[in-house]
Image (cartoon, grey):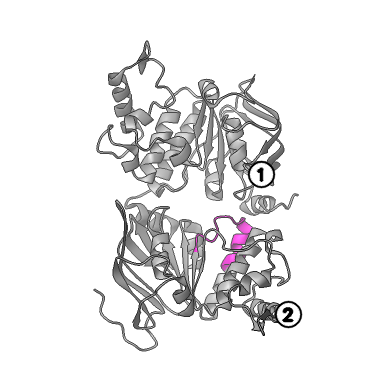
Amino acid sequence: MTSEPDLMNEAPALEARDLTKRFPGVLANDRVSLSINKGEILGLLGENGAGKSTLVKMLFGVYSADEGEVWMDGERVQIDGPGDAIDRGMGMVHQHFQLVGPLSVAENIVLGAEPTSNGFVKSADAERDVQALSDRFGLSVDPRAIVEDLPVGIQQRVEILKALYRGAEILILDEPTAVLTPQETDELLQVLRDLAASGVSIIFITHKLREILAITDRVVVLRGGAVVGQAQTEGASQQSLAEMMVGRSVVLSIDKGTSTVSEIVLEVNDLTVRDDRGQAAVKSLGLTVRGGEIVGVAGVEGNGQRELVEAITGLRHPRSGSISVDGAVTTRSSPRAINDMGVAHIPEDREKDGLVGSYSISDNLVLNRYREAPFASFGRRQFAAVAENARDLVERFQVATPGISTKVDALSGGNKQKVIVARELSTDNKLIVASQPTRGVDVGSIEFIHQQLVNERDAGAGVLLVSAELDEIFSLSDRILVIYEGTIVADLDAATATREQVGLLMSGVVE
């Protein structure tokens, strides 16, 4: 147990001591200790599943810790729910915004703490208070604007103002840039610098190394629910932080060389696809992918990427338009028929669309070929061939597992993703559709998966890469397509495109 801090001004604004949280079958946080000082920006770094969100939910009272203590300003505190945390001067901006779209900015900010008189909300006072708060912290918003009409970056400012309105002196931001353009991200980072200069303590949660180096004073790194290292940001590098996250040296940028482009393997013309609500998510979209190239699709999430990928891979039928693979029309073909034509699919949601968790690794590795020789003969399963295939792919694709009969549910996120990559890239492919291929995996697995996609390109396949990570898009792509509100607004040479250019296009600013 950490010794009791000096109760003078140097006591941390917030301190976690040996916080532990267990869920059924999972140790989410294991004796995590950290502290943050007044006016400091602390980076909480780790891959998805590292335990970052669980930790801050304990600090904010969403979860109760199984073990450990929370201290504020030198005193031990018991935080009984988010309301208690807010009363103690903490605020949290969640990864998924907690806003009411049809209400105004002012109404959202004061919701639950409205200025009233004789039981009536004083709307003019609310708008005036929000404007004063906005001016004070340099968070330019219109109090009368309707939230659902605002860009995502401005909505995030509303979330921050909502916390500040309630007196937050400690602000927790959970993956705050996940749905922002590069320009919106830069604006947010400047806002956070200004808040810290005014004395607000900020815990900044992310897995993006570039942002950690740009904004934080110190960094705490989590892996597997435990603290594996911490460092002063000054003097740190992306390489040193990545090595701390993974525990070994990693290559952050793939040296992919020049591509040799061949014939068109994917052609999409005038495609319109509806989302689950029946609204047009993809609108008259066209694109091509040639053999021997990686075409990256960059865009803020929610601009039609998911529906586009599902239409190409047969998981969703388009409303109109056409899709062709290697010259053959596949617009309304089944996923199996499209796969049989040489199309591999690394899905966005590996748990839902990529794996059967209760099946073994060996069974998951033949999900797309179980009915074919050598894995089946006259309708009978050939267990020896399935096992031999699994042993080969587990070794080639570096899947860390006790054995091929292990259920996929027992694997880490990175190894689950490697199972999908191994299955999809172990056949003779004409086209690989890779949607968020490295989401939620560690830096070492990212390095490996990126190299496999480059290997496919070099072997002559076309790769359509859909990613919310601009670093991934720029690292792998030969061409970059920018998608905005369901249509392709630019087709750029990756060698000459810039992050600023792509960021503006992602926000709808068309050159």
Q: Is residue 175 magenta?
A: yes
Q: Percent from the top left, x then y, of residue 139? A: 64, 72
Q: Secondary structure at mark 1?
A: strand
Determine the residue positioned at 51% across, 43% down. Answer: 436
For this rendering, which residue is in front, 490 or 140? 140
For this rendering, which residue is in front, 419 or 125? 125
Segment colored magenta: 174-189
The earlier-in-sequence mark between 2 and 1 is 2
Q: Is residue 170 above or below residue 285?
A: below
Tag nearer the camera, 2 or 1: 2
Number of numbered discs visible in the structure rendering = 2
Q: Percent from the top left, x then y, of residue 445? A: 39, 44
Q: Percent from the top left, x then y, of residue 489? A: 71, 43
Q: Quadrant of residue 193?
A: bottom right
Q: Is residue 462 visible?
A: yes
Q: Is residue 84 left or right of residue 325?
A: left
Q: Point out the residue furthest to the right here.
A: 511
Determine the residue positioned at 36% across, 16% down. Answer: 376
Q: Is residue 374 visible?
A: no
Q: Point out the residue furthest to the top here.
A: 378
Amino acid type indicated by mark 2: Ala
Q: Which residue is mark 1?
A: 483
Quarter of the image that includes the N terminus = bottom left
Q: Point out the residue furthest to the front here.
A: 118
Amino acid type indicated by mark 1: Ile
**Gap between marks 2 and 1, in whole Å?**
40 Å
Q: Is residue 448 magenta?
A: no
Q: Which residue is mark 2?
A: 124
Q: Residues within 10 Å of mark 2 (few under 14, many from 20)?
A: few
